[in-house]
C-alpha cells in the first residue's frame, strides 16, 4: 500500500521514547511491545487510519538466548468502509525444536490490476474491490541442525465485489475474475543459520515450498505452487552488511490471477506496485547494503532485477525489470535488533513507491 511514510516516521520516532526501558530489561523472557499509529491517504481508498503493533518474546521452555518469537497485529480502516485486519506470527518453542509461522487476516479492500504477463502496460491499470479471509500456517520440526521440515496449509476465499465495467477483468477470460476459494496443503523446508531472526549479519535463510491446491483442501481451483526463497548475509566490516536474495516461483494448472507469481510490493522489486507484473512464473534477484550508522539509526541501499513469464522457457532478458532505492531504519529493540523500515524504491521505467513496515524485506 502507498502510505504517507513521512507521517509514519515522525510518529514512530516520537513513540521511541518509551522503548528504552524495554531494552534495559534483564530477563530475556520479558516481552517487548511496540505500537505505531497508521495514517495514510490513497486516491482509491480515501483517508485511512489505524494502528500496528509487534511483540517479541521467548517461551519459558526455550534457552535464555534462543530464537525469539514474534506476533504482529495491524488494523486499518478507511473512510470508504474498507478494512484490513492481519496477524502475522513466527513462534519457536521447546528449545527451538518446533517452529510455526504464517498469517491470519481479514481484508475488505481495493487493489490495482494491470493484466497478466511481463509486458502488461501501466495505462491498463484498473481497480477492483474484494473481501476475503486468510489462513496461512506452517508447522515445522528441526530434524537436523538449522534444518526445519514440516507442512504448510493456506486458505483464501476471494469475493470480488466490484470491477471496472468493460475493463480487463470484466471482459477478458481471466481465471478467478469472479473470485473463489483456494486452499492447499503441502510441504515446506527451512534452512536457517542466521545469527539473528530480525536483522541477520551472517548465515543463510532458505525456504522451499511445494503446495498443491485441491478441492480436498477447500480450493475451487486445481494448481500446484512451487517456490524457493534464499538469502545469504555477509558482514564485511563492523555494522556494514550485504544481504543477497533470490526468489523463484512456478505455478502449474488452473491458477486464479490473484495467486499467480508477481513482482512488486515491499519485499520483491520495491518501486513497483505489488502485483504490477504477474504470471505463472517469476524469478527475482536482489541485493541490499545495510548500515546501522548511529545508535538506533541506519540506512540501506538496494537493487533488484527480475521478471515474470508464462513458462520457464519464456523468460526474456530484454524484458527484465530493474528497481533501486534506499531507506532509513530505526531500531525499536536493541535486544532483538528489530527495526522499522522506511524505503523508497524506483523502477527503471519511472514507477516509484514508499514502503513503511516492521522488519527487513529479506
Image: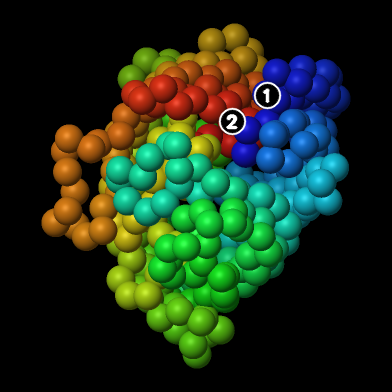
- What residue is drawn where x is 45% and y is 43%? 124
Numbered badge on residue 132: none
Query: x, y (%) of residue 196?
Result: 51, 39
Q: Residues within 10 Å of mark 2 (few under 14, many from 20)?
A: many
Q: Which residue is mark 2?
A: 355
Q: Is residue 230 above or below residue 97?
A: above
Query: Who is closer to the viewer here, 305 or 101?
Result: 305
Q: Are marks 1 and 2 in contact (CB under 8 Å)?
A: yes
Q: Is residue 65 above or below residue 12?
A: below
Whichever of callouts 1 and 2 sits on the residue coming sooner in the sequence is: 1
Query: x, y (%) of residue 352?
Result: 49, 25
- What residue is drawn where x is 68% and y is 40%? 44
- What residue is drawn where x is 26% and y is 53%? 309
Q: Secondary structure at mark 2?
A: strand
**In this image, 199 relative to 301: left or right?**
right
Q: Which residue is mark 1?
A: 5
- What residue is drawn where x is 59% and y is 30%? 355
Q: Quadrant of the C terminus?
A: top left
Q: How is the image coloured?
A: rainbow
Spatial CA span between label 1 and label 2: 7 Å
Query: Who is closer to the viewer here, 235 or 209?
Result: 209
Amino acid at each position: 500500500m502507498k502510505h504517507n511514510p513521512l507521517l509514519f516516521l515522525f510518529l514512530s520516532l516520537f513513540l521511541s521514547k518509551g522503548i528504552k526501558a524495554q531494552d534495559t530489561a534483564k530477563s530475556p523472557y520479558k516481552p517487548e511491545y511496540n505500537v505505531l499509529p497508521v495514517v495514510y491517504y490513497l486516491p482509491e481508498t480515501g483517508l485511512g487510519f489505524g494502528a500496528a503493533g509487534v511483540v517479541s518474546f521467548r517461551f519459558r521452555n526455550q534457552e535464555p538466548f534462543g530464537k525469539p518469537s514474534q506476533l504482529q497485529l495491524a488494523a486499518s480502516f478507511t473512510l470508504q468502509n474498507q478494512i484490513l485486519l492481519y496477524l502475522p506470527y513466527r513462534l519457536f518453542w521447546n528449545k527451538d525444536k518446533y517452529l510455526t509461522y504464517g498469517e491470519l487476516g481479514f481484508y475488505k479492500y481495493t487493489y490495482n490490476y494491470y493484466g497478466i504477463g511481463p509486458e502488461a502496460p501501466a495505462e491498463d491499470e484498473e481497480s477492483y474491490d474484494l473481501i476475503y479471509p486468510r489462513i496461512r500456517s506452517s508447522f515445522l520440526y528441526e530434524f537436523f541442525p538449522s534444518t526445519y521440515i514440516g507442512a504448510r496449509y493456506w486458505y483464501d476465499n476471494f469475493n470480488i465485489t466490484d470491477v471496472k465495467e468493460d475493463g480487463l477483468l470484466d471482459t477478458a477470460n481471466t481465471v478467478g475474475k469472479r473470485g473463489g476459494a483456494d486452499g492447499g496443503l503441502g510441504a515446506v523446508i527451512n534452512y536457517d543459520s542466521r545469527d539473528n531472526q530480525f536483522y541477520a549479519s551472517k548465515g543463510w535463510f532458505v525456504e522451499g515450498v511445494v503446495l498443491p491446491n485441491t478441492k480436498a483442501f477447500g480450493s475451487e481451483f486445481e494448481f500446484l505452487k512451487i517456490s524457493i526463497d534464499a538469502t545469504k548475509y555477509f558482514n564485511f566490516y563492523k555494522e556494514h552488511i550485504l544481504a543477497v536474495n533470490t526468489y523463484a516461483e512456478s505455478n502449474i494448472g488452473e491458477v486464479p490471477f490473484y495467486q499467480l507469481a508477481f513482482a512488486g510490493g515491499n519485499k520483491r522489486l520495491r518501486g513497483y506496485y505489488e502485483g504490477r507484473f504477474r504470471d505463472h512464473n517469476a524469478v527475482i534477484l536482489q541485493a541490499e547494503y545495510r548500515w546501522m550508522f548511529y545508535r538506533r539509526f541506519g540506512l540501506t541501499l538496494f537493487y533488484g532485477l527480475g521478471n515474470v513469464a508464462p513458462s520457464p522457457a519464456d523468460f526474456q532478458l530484454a524484458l527484465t525489470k530493474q528497481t533501486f532505492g534506499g531507506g532509513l531504519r530505526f531500531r525499536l529493540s536493541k535486544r532483538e535488533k528489530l527495526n522499522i523500515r522506511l524505503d523508497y524504491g524506483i523502477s527503471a521505467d519511472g514507477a516509484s513507491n514508499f514502503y513503511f513496515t516492521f522488519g527487513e524485506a529479506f
